[in-house]
Amino acid sequence: MEKDADGFYTPAAAGKSAEAQPSDSSARPQEGGGIRTEDKTDLIKSTFEVSVTLADQQRDKDSPLYSVKTFEELGLHQDLLKGIYDMGFSKPSKIQERALPLLLSDPPQNMIGQSQSGTGKTAAFVLTMLSRVDFSKNKPQALCLAPSRELARQIMSVVVAMGKFTSVQTEYAIKDNLPKNATNVTAQIVVGTPGTMTDLIRRKIIDVSEVKVFVLDEADNMLDQDGLGEQTLRVKNMLPRGQVQIILFSATFPDHVRNFANKFAPNANKIELKKNELSVDNIRQFYMDCRNEEHKYDVLVSLYHLLTIGQSIIFCQHRHTADRISQRMTAEGHKVASLHGAKDAAERDNIIDGFREGRDKVLITTNVIARGIDILQVNMVVNYDLPLLNERPGSSKDDARPDIETYIHRIGRTGRFGRKGISINFVHDKRTWAQMEQIEQATGKQIIRIETNDLDEMETQMKKALK
Ligand SMILES: Nc1ncnc2c1ncn2[C@@H]1O[C@H](COP(=O)(O)OP(=O)(O)OP(=O)(O)O)[C@@H](O)[C@H]1O
């Protein structure tokens, strides 16, 4: 099975793997901030392929994709092994190899698992849910929460694909999915967002008496007081005491939620990353020094050809910015889509499906899809606005600190499972410059300057980074 045009898993030629090229690290800033240009290319005109050999990276001991084990050795049921191989997976990744034996051991134990973006966390918790449910019982037994409907739908596509050779039944707990007069959910696995899940449990449409597994994807965000923390806790408090395995996964676990995570999933087995392992090496990070806000728009438009070579996601801080840019670009004849939380459910589904199918190549959005979204063709992420922590009341805009976690998740929309990717940050004044420097320090990865007026240079850099 491989992903179909709309990015969800469908039966197709199994076991296909893309091909890899060694990475090139010759691009270095010169004194004065310029960049050495080597081998000019015809990138804009060409249709060069962005590709990697997964098998090679899975052999590299230092790669998060490396594993000494096979899926057979991880103790999975035969029907699930069939599902995995049907999806074209041949070996587990490091997080899968390390987490699965712990997740599947009996008696069940809680887990707090961290590994870089795009390294296969979803498969680890989906396999756990599928392994734990009793398919002969028509009652919810595994609940999974995600921070956005887009991510919940994507997780569900993985449940359906991996469970293809089982008799699993599934249901969504996302807005506008179930009819108002819906009765008891009989599905064994329910995936949704915290608000709707709470509502359905309260209304007794979801009976939680048989729930055995509770998964939080993007757990740090789901537990953050400023995020979805309260709603998620409400769901947990409605579950039967003492019998539920709690599984938290994320690429990031900032200190201010770690304590809460430990209380939320007591006595959990833990897989943790060191700070310098947070971001993946296959994503090359650049910045462009724009003159002002208006110039950011002009630079983005000038990049349009490069943005559409593969697929690109443009992140803005506010919904109105995403709308304004997309309206302007559309009026000027460019094909772009915009997605944010103010759009209604059907429209959101339509937009993300169009992007997954490749009907749209450029998606302008907010943090709503900064986490978890897995579209392999995305090879470029632009931070039109750098992600910022919520500005505190009374503090000036100048004090706003960059949101490092969101930055890591945003750029992780590219470079999925060992593929190459590029991120470009727009800075346009002293404040944004300082914020970018803080990001560079926190991630420990160099962010390389590219001139805003040198498209040839950009093209050359892109080709090198994606090679
Ligand atoms: N063992 C494997 N072999 C091959 N491909 C895999 C394997 N495990 C996962 N993948 C693929 O790798 C991609 C990334 O996986 P996934 O979305 O689970 O990452 P993640 O760690 O949850 O990322 P994020 O932190 O962004 O949520 C997906 O397209 C998935 O199908």
Image (cartoon, rainbow, N blue to C red):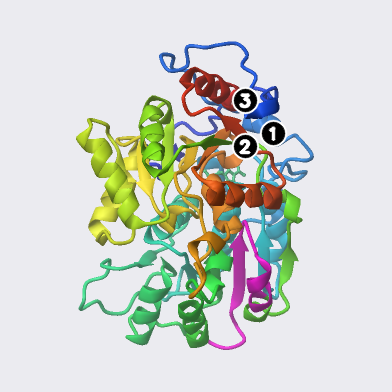
Q: Which residue is mark 2?
A: 418
Task: Say if residue 339 shows up in the picture.
Answer: no
- Label 2 to label 3: alpha-carbon separation: 29 Å
Work out whether mark 2 precedes mark 1 in sequence or the reverse, and give the earlier one. 1
Residue hosting label 1: 57
Which quarter of the rendered picture does the C terminus lie within? top right
Q: Residue sitting at 20 percent across and 36 percent down?
A: 331
The label shown at residue 34 is: 3
- Highlighted range, magenta: 240-261
198 horizontally vs 427: left or right: left
Mark earlier in primary sequence (1, 3): 3
Measured Cα–Cα span from mark 1 to mark 3: 32 Å
Say which amino acid is labelled 2: Gly
Relative height, residue 86 to residue 25 (above, below):
below
SS class, disc 1: helix
Instruction: Give the quarter of the image for residue 22.
Output: top right
Q: Nearer the viewer, mark 2 or mark 3?
A: 3
Q: Is residue 245 left or right of residue 178?
A: right
Classed neighbour count for the residue bearing mark 2: other residues with Cα under 10 Å, few (<14), some (14–19), many (≥20): many
Residue 326 image position (x, y, % from top left) = 28, 43
Dots 2, 1 in contact, CB < 8 A: yes
